[in-house]
Amino acid sequence: MAMSVEIKNNKLFIEIDLETPTPSASGKTLVVASTHGNTTTTAEVNGKPIIIGLNAYIKP
């Protein structure tokens, strides 16, 4: 999983690689991008790193 995060004009931009659709833990959806839990980024707000937990999925 490659993810880049940056702040421009007070907006958070997240770029993450798409994966081959894989069944989620419940099997109800197919995951196409995920951080697989919370990930600390290099982007900061008030001097503190932003933590992102991201799941993107499709319904079969």
Image: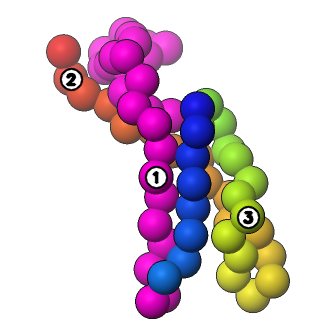
Mark 3 lies on residue: 42
For the residues labelled 3 and 2, the Cα–Cα distance comes to 32 Å
Say whether residue 14 is left or right of residue 46: left
- The mark that comes first in sequence, 3 or 2, is 3
- 60 within the magenta span: no
Q: Is residue 53 above or below residue 6?
A: above
Say whether residue 41 is left or right of residue 3: right
Could you classify mark 1 by the number of other residues whose Cα lies within 10 Å: few (under 14), some (14-19), or many (20 or more)? few
Q: Residue shown at 46%/37% (left/top)?
A: 17
* Amino acid type at mark 2: Lys
For the residues labelled 2 and 1, the Cα–Cα distance comes to 22 Å
Say whether residue 48 is left or right of residue 20: right
Could you classify mark 2 by the number of other residues whose Cα lies within 10 Å: few (under 14), some (14-19), or many (20 or more)? few
Quadrant for the C terminus, please.
top left
Q: Quadrant of residue 9?
A: bottom left
* Amino acid type at mark 1: Glu
For the residues labelled 1 and 3, the Cα–Cα distance comes to 13 Å
Residue bounds of the magenta highlight: 9-34
Say whether residue 26 is left or right of residue 40: left
Where is residue 10? Give x, y as percent. Answer: 48, 88
* SS at badge 3: strand
* SS at badge 2: loop
Mark 1 lies on residue: 15
- The mark that comes first in sequence, 1 or 3, is 1
Q: Which mark is residue 55?
A: none
Q: Which mark is residue 59?
A: 2
Quadrant for the N terminus, please.
top right
Q: Residue shown at 58%/39% (left/top)?
A: 2
* Amino acid type at mark 3: Thr
